[in-house]
């Protein structure tokens, strides 16, 4: 069967709020069929028909060109991030170790290329296996996505059992891998602190609340009914997010338990990035290198009063990289470079990377 191919390695449009803007994906669409997923391809019978795979030939040529031949462009954001050896984040679009990997081995091929160039990868997955991929603990690390430990098949119908995923976690730890737990999404009435008890020796925890696509009315209503939520519980920050005061209340027991076990953690919701142990919401202990110009790093370095000058200092050689292709709004507003992007949007309260975007409870402000 011939599958449509896509460019597997890209710069995320979220570079201003994420310390790992190099995103690598090996598949588009995912057979785990989680009901909260934004993907519209939720029917298993249509999965393989809609499946696309990463273009490994393109990746091979790109790595050879940058690292072996020294051919790169200073205005290319992708090339400069590669030269800086920023860790790749794999699994943002779809799971790299979903069952189709056993047949196609696209992730395995990508890992072999990364290993050849000593490139580090953080893998996000719900799987209980990596099949026969050659993943090296000296280079790579894991974030296991866990929303519950009750095997809620009504929400995650094709995800492996929690028993098998716990075994997978323990095997990774015994093999020397750094392993974090990503509670994404944190689902009210589903997600409980039992997750922390189950993975109490994790190297890091990242928490991010459930988000819904406002334009997808059918999916939005389905999820609200399933989770016993109403539209009054949400606020729109691009996507529909639970109101920040609701999220903070839900996270309270989690934060208390994480502190009890002395596990470093981050809140990955864009308006709560200041609640973090490090300079990357995915977790400093898990990665080899992240950027310094994402807002979590700036919050860690300068607090809630960081300035545009602080951003410029941290941008360095990245300031003149082209960013216009990442945003339709960039082209409309005449933004060409990464620095242009920050300049235009820094003081806007609607910009997720602005310190003004952070939600500070009234009692904290009074302090």
Image (cartoon, rainbow, N blue to C red):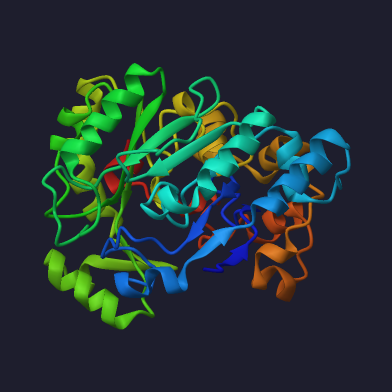
Q: Quadrant of residue 94?
A: bottom left
Residue 55 or residue 152, whichever sits in front = 55
Q: Residue at x 48, y 35 (%)?
A: 133
| Residue 222 shows in the view | yes
Q: Nearer the viewer, residue 292 or 171?
A: 171
| Location of residue 301 with respect to 339 vertically, above or below | above
Q: In this rendering, would 344 be left or right of 257?
A: right
Residue extending farthest to the front is: 1
Q: Quadrant of residue 201?
A: top left
Location of the C terminus by quadrant is top left
Q: Position of residue 220 (x, y in %)?
A: 27, 75
Dividing the picture into quadrants, the one containing residue 344 is: bottom right
Q: Find residue 273 and report its horizontal and vertical position in percent.
A: 43, 43
Q: Position of residue 285 (x, y in %)?
A: 45, 24
Say if 145 sits above or below 210 in the image: above
Q: Residue at x 64, y 40 (%)?
A: 293
At 32% from the left edge and 46% from the top edge, which residue is drawn?
A: 126
Please tell me how many numbered marks the rendered image carries. 0
The answer to whether residue 270 is seen in the rendering is no
Q: Residue at x 60, y 50 (%)?
A: 15
Q: Is residue 225 left or right of residue 156?
A: left
Which of 282/176 is in front? 176
Left or right: where does residue 87 sit relative to residue 31? Answer: right
- Frontmost residue, 64 versus 90: 64
Q: Position of residue 212 (x, y in %)?
A: 33, 68
């Amino acid at each position: 069967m011939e599958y449509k191919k896509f460019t597997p390695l890209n710069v995320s449009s979220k570079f201003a709020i994420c310390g790992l803007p190099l995103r690598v994906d090996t598949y588009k669409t995912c057979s785990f069929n989680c009901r909260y997923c934004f993907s519209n391809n939720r029917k298993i019978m249509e999965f393989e028909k809609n499946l696309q795979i990463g273009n490994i030939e393109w990746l091979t040529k790109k790595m050879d060109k940058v690292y072996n031949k020294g051919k790169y462009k200073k205005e290319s954001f992708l090339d400069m991030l590669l030269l800086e050896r920023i860790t790749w984040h794999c699994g943002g679009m779809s799971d790299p170790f979903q069952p189709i990997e056993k047949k196609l081995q696209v992730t395995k091929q990508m890992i072999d290329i990364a290993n050849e160039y000593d490139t580090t990868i953080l893998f996000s997955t719900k799987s209980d296996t990596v099949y026969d991929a050659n993943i090296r603990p000296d280079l790579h690390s894991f974030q296991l996505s866990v929303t519950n430990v009750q095997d809620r098949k009504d929400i995650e119908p094709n995800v492996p059992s929690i028993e098998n995923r716990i075994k997978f976690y323990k095997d990774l730890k015994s093999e020397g891998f750094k392993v974090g737990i990503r509670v994404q999404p944190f689902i009210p009435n589903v997600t409980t602190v039992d997750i922390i008890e189950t993975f109490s020796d994790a190297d890091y925890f990242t928490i991010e609340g459930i988000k819904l696509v406002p334009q997808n009315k059918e999916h939005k209503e389905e999820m609200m009914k399933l989770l016993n939520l109403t539209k009054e519980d949400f606020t729109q920050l691009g996507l529909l997010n639970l109101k920040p005061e609701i999220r903070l209340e839900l996270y309270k027991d989690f934060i208390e338990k994480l502190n009890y076990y002395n596990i470093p953690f981050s809140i990955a919701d864009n308006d709560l990035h200041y609640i973090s142990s490090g300079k990357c919401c995915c977790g400093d202990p898990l990665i080899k290198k992240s950027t310094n110009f994402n807002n979590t790093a700036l919050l860690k370095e300068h607090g809630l009063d960081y300035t545009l000058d602080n951003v410029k200092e941290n941008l360095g050689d990245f300031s003149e990289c082209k960013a216009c292709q990442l945003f339709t709004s960039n082209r409309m507003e005449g933004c060409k470079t990464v620095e242009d992007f920050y300049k235009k949007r820094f003081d806007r309260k609607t910009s997720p990377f602005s310190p003004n975007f952070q939600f500070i409870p009234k009692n904290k402000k009074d302090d």
